[in-house]
Amino acid sequence: MKRTRTLIPVALVAALLMSGCAAGGGTTKDANGKECLPSGEASNSVKVSGKVGQDLKLTSKTPVKAKESQRTVMEEGKGDLPKATDSINVAMTIFSGVDGKVIQQAPESAVPVAKDGLSEWAYDAFRCAIPGQEISFVTPVKEVTGGQDPANAGLEGVKNTDSLVMVMKFGKIAKAESTEKTAETCDELKPRDKKYPEVDLGDGKSEPTIKIPKCIEPPKDLEIKVLKEGKGAKIKEGDKVMTNYVGVDWNGAVRFDGNWTATGIEFDTTKGALIEGFTAAMVGQKIGSIVQVTVPPEQGYKDGMTRTFVLELVSEAK
């Protein structure tokens, strides 16, 4: 899944108000005291029906267009704002601002809120999120693509001169230790024991368990291991695949992120749409396979942390 400079999930990705943050009250500043992204005519106009991330439909008029990102709170939440070391659960639906067609439905999954791990537009969507809150977020396509071809980021049917309409529903916040704090617990690293990571696939219905002891040396290179070979078609670069995943930090296997459902979440294997380690682990594998991948920082989120993921390649996306 790509968080560095795209979605969060477009798979992410995809990746969100009158002065302040809310159309009807609520917080006006994020956890750092910075004003929340304001609403505008475009984000205020958004009306939807259905469940976010599953069967949501845009019922308001199109086209919807904004010169700059706008964020409107459609339903108020309750609780604390996420801090930089936290993750927050989010379900998302992305619509074309041109005709209101669904581009992607993304079921609820956890997203770290660290500024350096999100593109600017995504960070603006998340930094004022509160559990239970539902927002409309309208942004120019070029803010998401950085001016590159939208199709390469899985955004079909729109141009960089168009806008995207995103509706996000936020869930619980997961408190997490920062990478810095975790690193401080290791005075020295023990030599690598090649049996780790250990993965227990369990009953196949819930997410696997990954075991990595604290304070052992991480691998320097990308490591890919097929835990279960599927019987479906081989995945080619550019294919879209419904995928389950869970990831842990190398030091002690603290859960970093994950999404494990009956159908999976859509991942786009086009070059640049995911972190490099994810694309390498998926392309060339068969649908139905379960793959373990350990990703060094340079091929992951470039935040100094090695991580191990288990990916289940559920089916080809329709």
Image (cartoon, rainbow, N blue to C red):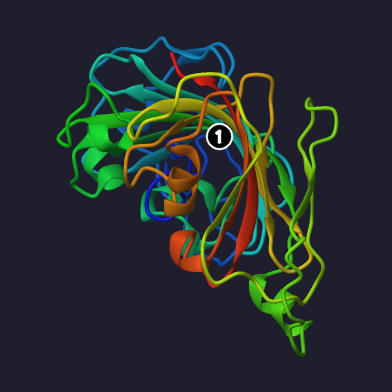
Q: Secondary structure at mark 1?
A: loop
Residue 21 on image: x %, y % = 50, 46
Q: Quadrant of residue 206?
A: top right
* Label 1, residues with CA under 10 Å away: few <14, some 14-19, many ≥20: few
| Percent of width and height locating residue 68 | 26, 44
- The residue depicted at 26 percent of the width and 14 percent of the height is 99
Identified at 76% across, 60% down, the residue is 253
In the shown orientation, is residue 251 left or right of residue 49?
Answer: right
Residue matched to label 1: 24
Q: Quadrant of residue 265?
A: top right
Q: Is residue 23 visible?
A: yes
Residue nearest the viewer, comparing 77 with 311 = 311
Q: Is residue 94 above or below residue 174?
A: above
Q: Residue at x 52, y 60 (%)?
A: 222
Foreground residue, 67 or 103? 103
- Residue 79 position, x and y percent, is 74, 46
Which quadrant holds the C terminus?
A: top left
Judge from the rendering whether residue 65 lies leftward or rightward of residue 265; answer left or right.
left
Report whether 169 appears left or right of 281. Answer: right
Q: Hey, what amino acid is under mark 1?
A: Gly
